[in-house]
Amino acid sequence: MLAAAISMTGFAQRNAQMRKDAKNVMGTAMKRSELRISDGSQAQGTQFTMSQTPVVSSRDLGDFEEFESMITNYDLQSNSAIGNRIAVWPNGSASFVATWDHSSNESFPDRGAGYNYYDGSEMGDEPEERQESVKSGWPTIAACGNGEVMASHATGVNLYYRPTKGQGEWQLIKNWGASYGSPTWPRVVVSGPNNEYIHVVMCKQIGNSSPYDNHVYYVRLKFENGEWEIPEELNDFPGVDNDAAGDYRNQLSADDYVMAANGNNVACMFSSYTTEVFYMISHDNGETWERQIIAPFPILGENGEPVHAIDFDDYPEGMTDSISTGDCSHSIAIDNDGVVHAAFGLFHWKVADSDSYTYWPVYGFGIVYWNSNYTNPQGGHEIPIFGTVASDANHPEWQANGLGYTLMPERIMELAELDGNDANLRVFGLIDEDGDGYYGSYENSTGAEWHYRTYGCATTPGVSVDNFGNVAIVYSVWSEVRINTTTNFSYRSAYVTYRSCNGVWYDDETNLSEDPMHMIDEVYPTTASPIAYDGTFWVYYSADEHQGLYLDISDTYPNSNQGQLTENQIFAVKLAPLAILGVAENEAVNPMTTTRVYPTPTNGVLNVEVNASQSSDVNISVFNIMGQKVSEQNTTVNTGINTTTINTESLSSGIYFVTVKANGFENTMKFVVE
């Protein structure tokens, strides 16, 4: 079992081992910029340790199928969080996008959206060209009814649509180009009862050099009267102040956001290591928004409350303690009941000087899982800052400067116990592959100066939730047993852990990299489709035998893809742990959460509203008082609220009944015709 509970057995012994291991994986990186590079130096700082129950990985958690969806020479799939790269449909089909290029030219002239489609039984041919007509990058995709939408950036952000998934020409809906400031790095999702709303989030870095004036833009499009209604202006994301002196102090930048949608609910999650972890959510398809903090940033402002974000210049004078925050990678999903599921990697760091910071990846290990049912001792939903919970007083050794240990893995587990339900708050990803009783035996590490865009031992989580409420989370983790013989540095592997709809965790993780074919694969990053159906989840990961990202190569960053431009394989993985999660493949589920008819009495048109928990074929029949069927129609409902109209002008005055049937279930309602 994973380290679900904190074991104190052998605590001193493990402390010594963890401290010994950590000395080999400490480094100092340059102050954050568009390209996050390392200067190769070292600085001392306060470190912490953690004990855990060891885990031996296993592939026993359900079946999975793996497909090579595409190969790309361009390896920078994201600057931080990666998401919205997979679209899925209830019939089992799925589409995949990645930043793609087949040329060996370092200017990457062919760069654009690589695309592949799984039709429910087999994966299509690997792409031989980009989807766009111009050089582009960083695509995201979403299902839109039976069609799909895709966003990527070239000169600004381009939004495309095609009415049939997997085939046909992409139609350019909108280019937010030079006249909009040429924004970049988009995310796209679709919401609404009839998939009529498209939501796009993007970033604009204003200025000629770092530090930039960063703005996160949001736009919503609506399909009405046969065409897309497109706002004329791009505005900052509602409730997210991007100004230099504002809430987020320009700290939210390239790819520091990821989106999810389900029915009428839409959410955008934000995080970087200099900001709090939070999301904005709308329950009315983007009309209004509210903010939910998941983890406050552990530095207090002048008012005594945690700041939303911090610039290096604002780091408290005299603060010598290191702090735990999100590591820039995060993921979000919304289930059919409106519960938000989120995950993020942990990062442990401190400011070294005005231009750099020191980090300890081993002490930032673990993926934090949180959902919106979590309730802290004060009655709120955020992870409370250290010092605000009574049990914090039991750990004076954690207190250095009061706030540095808000996101310590031990503390998160204690908070989960206080909540009484670790199904709502949890830390996982502590994999003891070599079975020696310790996590993080990196004696062979060369890597103080080596890192990716994200920094934790476990990072780039992808959260997926199906229509039953089952959750799958994929992530990339340092391996104890697979070592690159050239660099003498640990490879990364892809793992998956599951949580059932009943809140039960299955922690004997599925190791997607355990097959001999992946023995020399470096696996980074990983991601998942936020939406899944019927116990089947789609994830993907990038694999390459060379470590690091070639796009980050520099004289001070020598291990970036080991200095070579190579092919990266994008593997799409279909996970089907049905027996493990207790979801019968043919289990009958009533997809109709609620149904109603209005107006009644009616004198012309009757609206039949179905709030659906999953997509389904629906039969709607109208009967008179004698039980005779007077009208019938078939339609398809999608997750969320769906409205179908019935013409009642030909019906005589009196009492009628409408019966809605779906998946073997039926609801009957009375209405009156005047």
Image: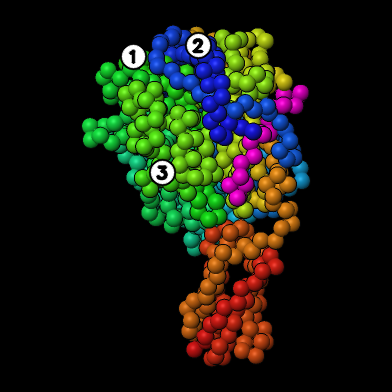
Amino acid at pointer 2: Lys
Q: Residues within 10 Å of mark 1 (few under 14, many from 20)?
A: some
Magenta highlight range: 500-518
**Residue 456 highlighted magenta (yes or no):** no
Q: CA distance from mark 2 to mark 3?
A: 34 Å
Q: Residue at x 61, y 41 (%)?
A: 505
Give percent across and percent down for residue 329. 50, 31
Give whichever of discs 3 and 1 has the lower sequence position.
1
**Amino acid beneath label 1:** Asp
Q: Residue 528 lies in what quarter of the image?
A: top right
For residue 661, say whether it is visible.
Answer: yes
Q: Tag 3's secondary structure?
A: loop
Q: Is residue 617 above or below residue 237?
A: below
Mark 3 or 1, which is nearer the eye? 3
The residue that appears at 38% across and 32% down in the rendered structure is: 392
Q: Locate residue 176: give its quadrant.
A: top left
Check the image and report above or below for 19 versus 277. Answer: above
Quarter holding residue 570: top right
State left or right for residue 291 relative to residue 345: left
| Secondary structure at numbered mark 1 | strand
CA separation, marks 1 and 2?
Answer: 20 Å
- Measured Cα–Cα span from mark 3 to mark 1: 35 Å
- Mark 2: give few (<14), some (14-19) or many (20+) Cα within 10 Å: some
Q: 414 or 154: nearer the eye?
A: 414
**Amino acid at the residue labelled 3:** Asn
565 displayed left or right of 599: right
Tell me, for residue 23, which label it has, or none. 2
Residue hosting label 1: 353
Q: Which mark is residue 376?
A: 3
Mark in front: 1 vs 2:
2
